[in-house]
Image (cartoon, coloured by chain):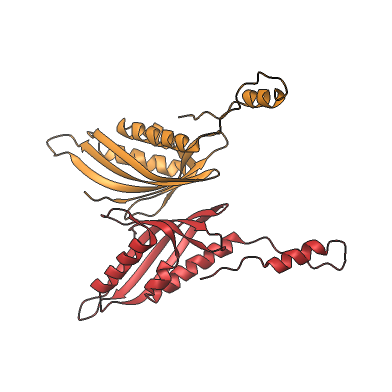
Chain colours: A red, B orange
Amino acid sequence: MRLVAPALSILVLSSSCASMPPCPAPAPAPNRRAEIEAFNRAMIEATTRMDDAGIVALWEDDGVTLLPQAKPIAGKKAIAAFIAQVTEANPGAKMRSFEMTCSGIEIAGDVASEYCDEHQVVDIGGDKPPFDGRGKLLFVLHRGADGSWRLRREMWNQGSE
Amino acid sequence: MRLVAPALSILVLSSSCASMPPCPAPAPAPNRRAEIEAFNRAMIEATTRMDDAGIVALWEDDGVTLLPQAKPIAGKKAIAAFIAQVTEANPGAKMRSFEMTCSGIEIAGDVASEYCDEHQVVDIGGDKPPFDGRGKLLFVLHRGADGSWRLRREMWNQGSE
């Protein structure tokens, strides 16, 4: 996912045209909330597709994920290795559905946080019943120099019905 | 806990004295990391004392805690009610030890995050063995207008040995 930063050409045009009406409307203020909603959609889409590379791309290089009964997994490489390990351990798995609803987006400059409910149904393969699980997530996001929001910190725990 | 903001009188003195040596040293830049370490110590001390009011005081009015197998608990009043309920349900409980070690303090203006390991041993009372549990925490903190850092968001999950 690549989020679009305000085009420099438009900003230059706006500032040089102040004394030359009719002047185009100023560039709109960036909608950080919409950017984070786009991040959430990208996470939902990559998870639904079981697109491991797509999920890893949504992490910062020095992101940290905090999973139950495990030590913190720090760094994009370690997170990628962990995701690959889960995929390898479940060769027949197929995501039947993945839903994630986030609340409470709060933004301070280039840092944001939000918390989400997730519900996933995964066909395990063979004659096993599907895995049907619910969880909650707390995300700390960071907006990089390229204008993209990525995961900096994530914790998951068990959800309620 | 009240953290000390730079005294306004010192700042005023510094700026008015620039051309009048000997001038006192300028006020030091506030050490936000030290403030957050003080927050952590206050949380450890209140938890160790089982000081429910002290714990609640470390929350923002609209803080949210995210506990396993539960819906988000939003707002200081709801968090206080939840803590009181846990205390009532365990009348003989006494904290034998509580340790919390935090890592990765990151500060952006008035917002910060960090993650922590905790280990608690609680005497349950009667002839029951003590509860000995480990967990991880992800904190999002906010610095209020009064200069105090408080919990804005918290998630807990199970730790590892």
Image side of residue B9 versus residue B125, left or right: right
Quarter of image, res A4: bottom right
Question: Residue A140's x, y, as percent?
Answer: 46, 54
Q: Is residue A83 above or below residue B114?
A: below
Question: Residue B78's x, y, as percent?
Answer: 43, 44
- Residue at 23 percent of width and 44 percent of height: B133
Which residue is outermost to the bottom? A126
Residue A138 visible in the snapshot: no
Q: Is residue B146 above or below residue B67?
A: above
Q: Along the line of sight, which residue is nearer the eye, B103 or A99?
A: B103
Q: Along the line of sight, which residue is nearer the eye, A91 or B120?
A: A91
- Residue at 30 percent of width and 64 percent of height: A82
Q: Is residue A138 above or below residue B128?
A: below
Q: Along the line of sight, which residue is nearer the eye, B139 or A72?
A: A72
- Residue at 78 percent of width and 64 percent of height: A14
Residue A75 visible in the snapshot: yes
Question: Residue B155's x, y, as percent?
Answer: 38, 50
- Residue at 23 percent of width and 76 percent of height: A129
Which residue is outermost to the top? B22
The count of marks equals 0
Which image quarter holds the C terminus of chain A? bottom left
Q: Is residue B130 above or below residue A126?
A: above
